[in-house]
Amino acid sequence: MTVSAAAVKAEGVVKSFGRQEALRGIDLEVAPGEVVVIVGASGSGKSTLLRCINHLEKIDAGRLWVDGELVGYVQKGDKLYELPDKEIARNRSKIGMVFQRFHVFPHMTALENVMVGPVEVLQVEKKEARERAQSLLDRVGLGARASAYPAQLSGGQQQRVAIARALAMRPALMLFDEPTSALDPELVKEVLDVMKDLAHEGITMIVVTHEMGFAREVADRLIFMDEGVVVEAGTPAQVISSPQHARTKTFMSKIL
Amino acid sequence: MGGHRGSDHHAEDQRRDQLGIVRTEADGEAGAVPPVPPPSSRIRAIPARHPGRWVATALVLVVLVLFLIGVATSKNFQWDVVGQFFGSSSIVHALFLTLELTAYAMVIGIALGVVVAVMRLSPVPVVSGTSWLYIWFFRGTPVLVQIIFWYNIALLTGQHPAAGIPFTHVVFFHIGVNKLVTPVVAAVLGLGLNEAAYMAEIVRAGILSVDEGQREAALSLGMNRLQTLRLIVLPQAMRVIIPPTGNETISMLKTSSLASVIGVAELVGTTDIIAGRTFQWIPLLITISLWYLIVTSILTGGQFYVERYFARGSTGMLPPTPLQRLRALFTRNVTEFHGRPPRVPGAGRPHL
């Protein structure tokens, strides 16, 4: 099956939890290097979509490709075969994920958090991994806190460690699941600044967020989701300033 | 004193330096250490009086002293005999056997317990079901029965059962059961296999206590299930696992005395043998009780340090070690000591 070189492609993706349908037919295509921001009310399926993309959730119907490869399955003829855990892990290692509640490893220092992926998954030598981890921490502005444990760091600092940890795997794609929603207002900027830098470097990013300023500034495309479907997509200016759909209008009027 | 106040602020700064807390604009919660009020505005008040507390103290002290005098002076305790037995070779030998039983049983218990706990959490029904059955059986029968059972295992297997491939005539060798399962081995098997059931539940509780997000973060880095368990989940689970494991070890120290029933000459078994001859029950029981207390105290101390190690990065301020506490006691009058932070890092708010 040849699929265009889209970084992420979704066709009719459906996901339900019991009787609750989180995704009800998502069609989406993200080009390499594109920065896509997804907005929508809570429960609209944004986070579920991100979690499906790196196979933390299994989709129920439709097709989902990352980098031209089916997520979680391989297709031979007209049959789908579930990928073995090893392959799924390998595919996940190419996708960076940043969580709303950081999920940095509390028993490791900032440096160890960033090192553990390359050392254990990519079998990078410790010395090399340490140097790279240090330079990544420098890059997110935490070079001086390399030996701090997460409990000694503020929320914004923890989230920046989490971003460095994801970047350490040299991912082709970064997923951000409401990365600033759990932060105190004064700490939001430091995280957004790091994300803006990434966006300018041309890494493919899918960002679920409520930060409209961020969306306006860096998003190539803004997607509005509601009740498990993509309602509207376009440039940030279009969707924010002149939404076409009634539901988008309502949503924008509430948050702006 | 005035001069010391100045150094007080200095000490506070040092404390922050040690913890690696740097005041930056992005500091947030971690740096929110309230400023120390200037010396002049500190409250100096005469403490409230609590006469009731003094009365209670006096009453308890009187009873305690009377009791201790009675214990120390009564002839029936035969302290001189306790002194003779305390370091005698038979008791010391028995003590080592008790320690050996405890150590082997706990090693089996912990190792097998981790395996049974991980099996219990397996998505494969037969695997998790088997684990459930194991726990059900070994927790549901008295450990004494299990020890006696292992002691009599030859009645079940015969003296020389064959080891080979089942349902064929292939036999590799014959096992000498009575040589293999000595009373000590029977006791270790009984204690260890029973302990594994309890440890499995403790380990399972520890694993379940780790935030699901930690597992997801590890998976999204591309770790497999085993790496996630070994590198991320178990180290964090240790904080929950260690305290009850310490309890179990201390409990095992004393439960190992059940081995005396099948003729193992550990502390209680030895007491049984000697007192059976000499009828010096009281001094012997006191002797071994003292030994049990001493070992328990050592284990309690060890547990404290193991807990501190696994609490690294997870708690706000670690409790000071006894040594640090002692040092604080002596330095307090000199520099108005505020409690020196431990060297193990860990400051700010406790993690999720």
Image (cartoon, helix red, strand yellow):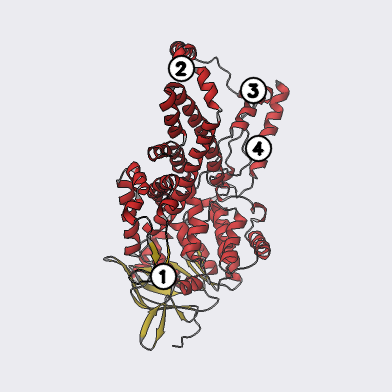
Residue under label 4, please give it. Answer: B15
Same-subunit check for callouts 1 and 4:
no
Q: Chain of mark 1?
A: A
Q: Residue at x 48, y 31 (%)?
A: B292
**How far apart, in angstroms, are the residues tagged by discs 2 and 1?**
73 Å
Q: Does any portion of residue A211 appear in the rendered image?
A: no
Q: Which mark is residue A164?
A: none
**How far apart, in angstroms, are the residues tagged by discs 4 and 2?**
52 Å
**How far apart, in angstroms, are the residues tagged by discs 2 and 3?**
60 Å
**How far apart, in angstroms, are the residues tagged by discs 3 and 4?**
22 Å
**How far apart, in angstroms, are the residues tagged by discs 1 and 3?**
61 Å
**Quarter of the rendering occupied by the C terminus of chain A:** bottom left
Residue under label 2, please give it. Answer: B77
Residue A19 position (above or below residue B36): below
Residue under label 3, please give it. Answer: B40
Q: Nearer the viewer, residue B66 or B15?
A: B66
Residue A180 position (above or below residue B14): below
Amino acid carrying mark 3 in the image: Ser
Q: Nearer the viewer, residue B325 or B294?
A: B294
Q: Position of residue B190 (x, y in %)?
A: 39, 47
